[in-house]
Image (spheres, rainbow, N blue to C red):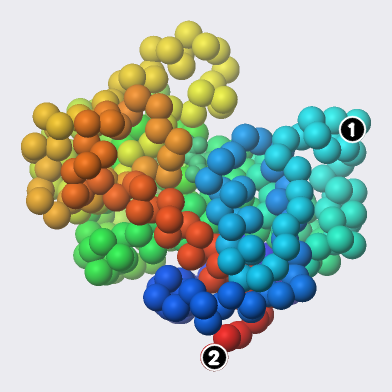
């Protein structure tokens, strides 16, 4: 049985296959409409979500399956003190696959050790968010036509942003990738990512504070929200929250073929005035999130459609 805890759980070849499947699903949705007839997905969300939970659910419904779950810890027995391991033992009796989001790093890993169904990590604290990475990779592939030979700017909360951590893990396996890490000093990429991943693998990167300095040389600009819920005090958050605002003026400095991604939700970091810019790819990105999660569910359930 397979789980998805980190993007590294798939080899590059397996990832290529999964992204190819997502593209086929986009092109021929009818072919897959009954692939999961009779199967059930449970979504166990201990933290707020719009896209991640609903796109997993939409994915299962598009495949002909059914869904169940809870969308907050308060509406589950976690509020009575139940452990993740007991909850997952229960869910294993009711569903065929589950997606779990939890504020504690490692909670989905604990779940998969006690589960008899595949567990998808739908975000664990400030650690990883592998299904967002699948979405990001599919988006980059669709807008740029490749996943290698690229300069990727990661901007915003690189400290707590789990989508950034997972995306780096996935992209360093492709040839010719370099990063520009754009953040305020206090929200720099953690040492365990910089030293243990980038330095160790000799991946070229640069750290800058000003977005304007980085933007002219990027192929992809990946914007992120300052992760309010992970701050220890409100004051620090308020000071950081509007540090970056991508607007028309800054987009004028960007190459014609530099695409802007954002895992969403956005707060103020992308001005709505650039939503109609052809380089704004973040709404496409959330649509791709459904196709890629359909491909993921099929892969983890080992269901093949000819
Ligand atoms: C991201 C997350 O939950 O980490 N959202 C998402 O799943 N699309 C990013 C965020 O909340 O800022």
Across and down, in percent, residue 31 comes to 53, 82
The numbered mark at residue 3 is: none
Residue at the bottom extreme? 306
Residue 188: image quadrant is: top left
Q: Which residue is mark 2?
A: 306
Tell me which residue sits at (22%, 59%) in the image: 150
In the image, residue 13 sits, relative to residue 218, either above or below, namely below
Tell me which residue sits at (59%, 75%) in the image: 33
- Position of the N terminus, as image quadrant, is bottom right
Residue in the foreground of this view, choosing between 232 and 49: 49
Tell me which residue sits at (55%, 63%) in the image: 293
Mark toward the start of the polypeptide (2 vs 1):
1
Across and down, in percent, residue 273 comes to 22, 31
Across and down, in percent, residue 56 comes to 60, 56
Q: Which residue is mark 1?
A: 81
Residue 214 vs residue 161: left or right? Answer: left
Mark 1 within 8 Å of ligand 1, using the beta carbon = no
Residue 66 vs residue 261: left or right? Answer: right
Label 2 vs label 1: CA separation?
Answer: 45 Å
């Amino acid at each position: 049985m397979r789980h998805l805890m980190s993007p590294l759980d798939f080899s590059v070849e397996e990832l290529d296959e999964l992204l190819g499947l997502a593209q086929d699903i986009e092109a021929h949705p009818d072919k897959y409409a009954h692939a999961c007839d009779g199967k059930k997905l449970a979504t166990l969300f201990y933290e707020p979500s719009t896209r991640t939970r609903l796109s997993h659910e939409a994915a299962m419904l598009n495949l002909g399956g059914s869904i169940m779950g809870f969308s907050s810890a308060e509406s589950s027995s976690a509020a009575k003190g139940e452990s993740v391991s007991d909850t997952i033992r229960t869910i294993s009796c009711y569903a065929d696959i589950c997606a779990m989001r939890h504020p504690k790093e490692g909670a989905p890993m604990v779940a998969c050790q006690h589960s008899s169904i595949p567990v998808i990590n739908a975000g664990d604290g400030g650690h990883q968010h592998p299904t967002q990475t699948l979405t990001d990779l599919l988006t980059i592939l669709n807008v740029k036509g490749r996943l290698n030979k690229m300069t990727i700017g990661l901007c915003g909360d690189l400290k707590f942003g789990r989508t950034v951590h997972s995306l780096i893990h996935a992209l360093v396996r492709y040839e010719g990738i370099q990063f520009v890490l754009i953040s305020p000093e206090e929200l720099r990429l953690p040492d365990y990512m910089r030293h243990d991943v980038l330095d160790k693998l000799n991946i070229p990167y640069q750290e800058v504070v000003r977005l304007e300095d980085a933007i002219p040389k990027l192929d992809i600009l990946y914007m992120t929200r300052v992760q309010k819920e992970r701050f220890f005090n409100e004051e620090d958050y308020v000071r950081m929250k509007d540090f970056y605002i991508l607007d028309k003026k800054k987009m004028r400095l960007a190459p014609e073929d530099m695409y802007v991604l954002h895992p969403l939700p956005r707060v103020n970091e992308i001005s709505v005035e650039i939503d109609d810019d052809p380089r704004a790819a973040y709404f496409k990105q959330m649509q791709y999130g459904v196709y890629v999660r359909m491909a993921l569910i099929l892969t983890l359930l080992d269901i093949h459609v000819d």
